Amino acid sequence: MTDVLEHAGGNPGRSGHRLSIAAARAVYDTREEIAHFFGVTDPMRVIFTSSATHAINLTLRGILKLGDHVVTSSIEHNAVMRPLRNLEKQNIRLSIVACAADGTLDVKDLIKVIDSNTRLVVMTHASNVVGTLLPIAEIASIAHQAGALLLVDAAQTAGALPMDIQAMGIDLLAFTGHKELQGPPGIGGLVIADDVDTTKIEPLMCGGTGSRSESEEQPNDLPDKFESGTANLVGIAGLGAGLKWVKDKAINEIREHMKELNQALLDGLSIIPRVKIYGTLDPERSVAIVSFTVTGKSVSEIALRLDEEYGVLSRVGLHCTPAAHKTLGTFPEGTVRLAPGIFTTVSDIQEATQAVAKVIKS
Amino acid sequence: MTQYGVVLFYTTSSVMRAEKLLKTEGHSIKLIPTPRQFSSDCGIALRFDWNYCEEIKLMLDEAKVEYANMHSLDT
């Protein structure tokens, strides 16, 4: 990121001078790496956005039209739920498939609500509260049979799991840079599968693209159609560096390490009296995100003491998803969520769970 | 004196893609501000040795790199 500011500080695609070209190269290189990482042939189908939320809004508002039907799950983050609730007021019909109390989704329940008017199915890949994975490949095939597209919110899973959008049948994938892709905050993107007709997606924003400057109409060329305004060069360069790190480390190894941490967390927490853990309790069926509550103790008190007395940082409350907490039965109090990162070790996890035990005792 | 040509593109991303492709294949190319006589499109054009016109055209087509057109540069 420092390098790109010092040596390529121009505006990508806006000039022919060397700094602008160097900036455009940095942006393109990351675009190509992202396409390759998610299994898309055409790098122009990687659209950079400011966040996964931005990518989700772009898709929902770009595709759904008056009278369309859209289906989602009951464990969605507000990044999905709020734009959908907003669109519902604009006469878009919304169905929410109820997940089980561990966050799992039975595809039979999706089949029940999907119909010939369903234009889009939007599902998270994994719950941001309990890590539960949804059966994306099965969901994709059901959506496609009904003639609908599938948008996946991969905020929790991009960089955490091997992901080939073609093999999984994902049409549109929203990702963020600042989580498992090890990039900085403020950068995300939308990956569009090679066979999706982008002429049927309206841009969320129109404006300057550095291309077809003679025209006052928004161009249809990708990625420019969806990327008006100055790009986040520093964020994109940081995302590129993070992704390179992930690729060097190997995604399968990352997944194995995170499963081990997940199991250690579950093992450590499950032996503490009065602790209730939510989700599948199975690292094979989730990403490493664990939520718990303690009978007779408030979640915020636990979090404050974990931080102040033991340096263990958690997030408590509703995690921007009232829907998921209603599904889990933890609304409105919420849970304490512990989510290790790739640099966390098993001994860190043991220290953290021992800290939870001590906080509960006193 | 080398006779140059330019490839004009619709998007900067396509220019970057073409540059990478042609450089990998060892072509001597340069990115330049689009000469204004070719009122077009994206602000960056790719300048190449006109002797390789057909070869470059074929490579871009094969790799499905989208471009607007190619012109010879009379200097």
Image (spheres, coloured by chain):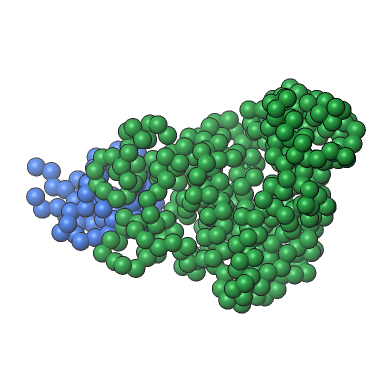
Q: Which chain is green?
A: A
Residue A259 appears anywhere in the view? no
A6 lies left or right of A342: left
Counting from the top left corner in percent of width and height, residue A196 is at 53, 62
Counting from the top left corner in percent of width and height, residue B2 is at 13, 43
Counting from the top left corner in percent of width and height, residue A285 is at 77, 44
> Nearest the camera: A316 or A237?
A316
* Position of the C terminus of chain A by quadrant: top right
Counting from the top left corner in percent of width and height, residue A29 is at 42, 42
Q: At x 79% / y 64%, what residue is drawn?
A: A109
Vertical relation: A298 (above or below) A358: below
A87 lies left or right of B11: right
Q: Quadrant of residue A4?
A: top left
* Position of the N terminus of chain A by quadrant: top left
Q: At x 20% / y 61%, what residue is drawn?
A: B39
Q: Which chain is blue?
A: B
Q: At x 72% / y 59%, what residue is drawn?
A: A73
> Nearest the camera: A56 or A107?
A56
Q: At x 66% / y 73%, what residue is drawn?
A: A93
